[in-house]
Amino acid sequence: MDYAIPADRVVITVAQTGAITKKSLNPNVPEQPAEIAESALQCYNEGAAIVHIHARDPQGENTSEVAVFEDIHGRIRDKCDLIIQDSTGGGPNLTQEQRINCIKAGPDMASLNMGSLMRVAGPYKGVPFSNMPEEIDWFVEQITKQGIKPEMEVYSHSMMHEVHRIIREGRVQKPYYVNIVLGMRYQGAEPASPATLTSLVNNLPPDSIFNCTGVGSAQLPLATMAMVMGGCVRVGLEDNIYYAKGQLAESNAQLVARVVRIARELGKEPATPAEARQYLGLPA
Ligand code: KMH
Ligand code: ZN
């Protein structure tokens, strides 16, 4: 069975909110459930198929409250059939037990971070983003036993080794969905260069589909490169708050619309959520 995405389609994920991209950095970051759902609908209308979710409390801090995730899911599902992918990366203020809480709200997918990174700047400098091998095994077990598909986030070659390991150990099912995240300013994360993306794509396991997330100014160039390589792409304010140098993005939908314009120039239509479900092996 060939798990490649058809050459004339691209699956677009929008990461709208994130953990560290607060309204103070860009007032257009949607933080509350109604804002997140309204923005998700706009992104769906522009061509997104998957929405990656972080939740915030009323003060804008990262929260693991299941009720907040349920509220977000319900509001999105009332509006459209976007594939819902919750973040188990959560945020630096959340414990491992809190990070997994979101899956109780019943997303279609959940992020699974494939290794540890060290925060080297900002208020959480020196606080590790811990995803040791045994923690990865714990997260993947919690996710898969609920029939949720893991989105394996890989920031370096060493994390790609962990992907191969959990496949070898039978912890994930085909098609494997690997998100290559490049350009994070954390120790242990690799740069957003064409060479790094090419090398990581060359190291993907068989039967996998890849997505590319370029952080910051790398978002658009790496997304373009990933589309040429047959990959899926992620855009949005979680990873990049700017539309151009010094110009804040007006909305998540603006970033989705731009990548759709480029996709069409490359002969690709954005996959609908129903098509994306089929490619990723998600229930219809
Ligand atoms: N902000 C991304 C670069 C997660 O939510 O699990 C990392 C991320 C992690 O998406
Ligand atoms: Zn995230």
Image: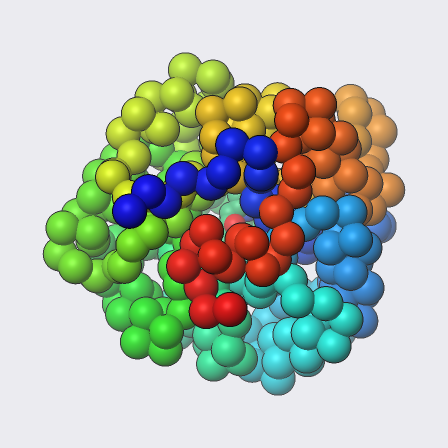
Residue 182 appears at what percent x and percent y? 48, 31
**Compared with residue 69, is residue 224 higher up or lower down, i.e. above or below?**
above
Q: Report the residue that reaches farthest toward the left.
A: 169
- Residue occupying the point 27% across, 29% down: 203
In the rendered image, is residue 92 in sight? Answer: no
Task: Give the quarter of the image for residue 126.
Answer: top left
In the rendered image, is residue 204 in sight? Answer: yes
Q: Nearer the viewer, residue 111 or 257?
A: 257
Residue 144 appears at what percent x and percent y? 32, 70
Q: Nearer the viewer, residue 100 or 71?
A: 71
Task: Give the quarter of the image for residue 188.
Answer: top left
Residue 16 appears at what percent x and percent y? 68, 52
Q: Nearer the viewer, residue 92 or 37?
A: 37
Left or right of 239: which side holds 44? right
- Residue occupying the point 41% across, 15% down: 195
- Residue occupying the point 64% across, 62% down: 82
Residue 228 appears at what percent x and percent y? 53, 23
Left or right of 234: which side holds 253? right
**Compared with residue 66, is residue 37 higher up or lower down, i.e. above or below?**
above
Task: Give the quarter of the image for residue 173.
Answer: bottom left
